[in-house]
Amino acid sequence: MTLIALGGVIGAGLFVGSGVVIDETGPAAIISFLLAGGLVVLVMRMLGEMAVARPEVGSFYAYARLALGNWGGFTIGWLYWYFWVNVVALEAVAGASQIHAWLPGIPLWVVSLCLMVLLTGVNMFSVRSFGEFEYWFSSIKVAAITVFLVVGLVFVLGLWPGAHADVSNLTQHHGFAPHGIGAVLTAVIPAVGFFTGAEIAALAAAESKNPRRNVARATRSVVLRVLLFYVGSIFLVIAIVPWNDPSVAQGPYVATLQRMGISGAGTLMRVLILVAVLSSLNAGLYSASRIVFALTRNNDAPRGLTKLSGRGVPRRAILLATVLGYVSVIIAYVSPDAVFSFIVHSYGAVALFVYLLVALSQVRLRRRLEREDPGALTLKMWCFPYLSWFTIAAMTAVILAMVVLPSTRSDFAASILTLAVVLGAYGIRAYRGRCRVRATTPAVGLAPVREREPEPRRS
């Protein structure tokens, strides 16, 4: 459970996407990642409290439904599904790009299709297969980032051969925040997206042998490790390599290892990025399929998706989660250069909307648990309710910043459109439900027509 939580966070975004954030923010990217990580840690604690008190299939979908009503569960469930099917598509193309660099003779779409088929098969087989793959993927990522932290710290302290203690890159080259405070706040938005994935531990809790104990351990461990892995490694990258070096935007960790004189750094990081991509793709398929399975329990998704295989795997839900991934394969075939832009801009702030609904659910559900079952609150949110409301206010501020800042306005518009579609779908579902109730309710003053009881079959 702990490795699933950590593996969900350490993805290709850390190894590749963080370079773009550093390039657009400067050394102050450390602050951006610290703010984003802090928000995610608080949300994880809130989610952990609910998951330990009420382990449920679908996790925060079930909690939003309990706390906010049917609309809350429907909205958070489909938004989260949409987020992860986008991740599946993005990671399929990202992984194919890494392999394509080694095998340029094979078209990008062919490699992407092979990765999709492979990971779909893993998830279709059994939940144990997902757990085993994610365990090893996450172990490799955690080991790699730990080695990077140790080696980088040795270099910064001047204990590396030919190195001397120096952190002047943090303030040189136009200062600590060369693009201003606005750029620091802007960078929080993609940074939150990089952190998204830790909540998978709460989703998987319902399928573990001891959900209360396991999710509590995973929640506690991810708190410090997330901050250490992200903020610590970003600090070392900026301290070792000037932030405005062109190689940082292309691959911050490769640039850092090359500056330290480690041979084969490019090949080493490409292998690690591929592992991170496969891990995220694996986790995305799992998360999207499980949230859809939970949605079917309350008729928020077609009942046909509840069908399980002999091994207890919701195969139809998994296949639904792969739809956008296979669409991305088609786009990669038609226009390889456009696929990343198409996918990334289509889900913008969806993760923030999900986290905001999780936080609102925790506030309401905590009050109910304190009245009805206080003994279930064995893992509590810190400084409740003040820190919970602070988290809600902070996420609202980040969402509003997307409206104000020109660079994120288009992403916000796409995200609002996604939210409007989901809310519209819920409105249609609710309207049809009311129509069905009216159709089956007898008119006032008339006795309902009684169906004739079938006669027992004679022998």
Image: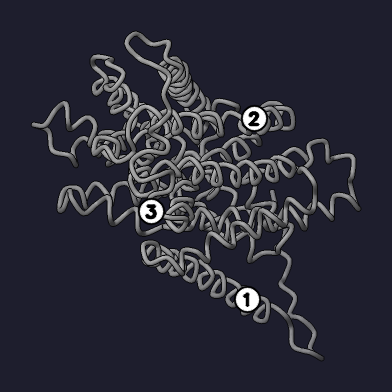
Q: Which mark is residue 436?
A: 1
The residue tagged 3 is 179
Q: Are marks 2 and 1 in contact (CB under 8 Å)?
A: no
358 in relation to 377, above or below: below
Q: Quadrant of residue 66?
A: bottom right
In percent of the image, x 66 and y 64: which residue is there?
Answer: 70
Q: Amino acid at mark 3?
A: His
Q: Secondary structure at mark 2?
A: helix
Left or right for 259, reference 359: left
Q: For the residues marked 2 and 3, what is the alpha-carbon distance in whole angstroms?
A: 37 Å
182, 354: nearer the viewer: 182
Label whose residue precedes the other's in the sequence (2 or 1): 2
Left or right for 334, reference 300: left
The residue tagged 2 is 218
Q: Which mark is nearer the camera, 3 or 1?
A: 3
- Crowd around label 2: few <14 · some 14–19 · many ≥20 (10 Å): many
In percent of the image, x 29 and y 41: which residue is there?
Answer: 244
Q: Which mark is nearer the camera, 2 or 3?
A: 3
Left or right for 46, reference 348: right
Q: For the residues marked 2 and 1, what is the alpha-carbon distance in whole angstroms?
A: 43 Å
